[in-house]
Image (cartoon, rainbow, N blue to C red):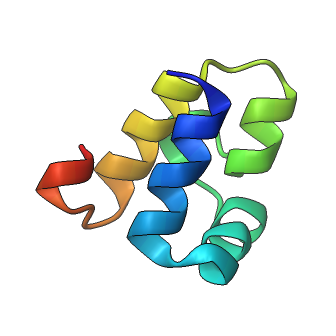
Amino acid sequence: MRLTEFWARMSEQFGETYAQSVAKDYVISSLGDRTVHKALADGEDAKVVWRAVVETFNVADRLR
């Protein structure tokens, strides 16, 4: 998954502004207690990060 697709899915799921807030502020345990931004900055694959978001939040089936 490319980062552009990742951010498009985040925006579609949460809305553009809230997606950035979730990515910046919400610590996800399956990402090693990191935020989305920190995991991506650390080089984690976007697909792995997206799966963690899907597991943590009630993501629409069409975006999974």
State the residue in front, 27 or 24. 24
On the image, which quarter does residue 13 sit in? bottom left
Q: Position of residue 27 (x, y in %)?
A: 65, 58
On the rendered image, what quadrant is the C terminus found in? top left
Q: Reply above or below: 12 against 2.
A: below
Furthest-right residue in view? 41
Furthest-left residue in view? 61
Q: Position of residue 59 (x, y in %)?
A: 27, 61
Q: Position of residue 35 (x, y in %)?
A: 71, 51
Residue drawn at point x = 54 percent, y = 40 percent: 6
Residue drawn at point x = 84 percent, y = 24 percent: 42
**Is 52 placed left or right of 7 in the picture?**
left
Q: How many marks?
A: 0
Q: Position of residue 15 (x, y in %)?
A: 52, 78
Q: Reply above or below: 32 against 36.
A: above
On the image, which quarter does residue 12 sit in? bottom left
Residue drawn at point x = 30 percent, y = 48 percent: 55
Does residue 15 appear in the picture of this structure? yes
**Is 49 placed left or right of 61 in the picture?**
right
Residue drawn at point x = 65 percent, y = 32 percent: 3
Does residue 34 appear in the picture of this structure? no
State the residue in front, 63 or 36. 63
**Is 48 placed left or right of 54 in the picture?**
right
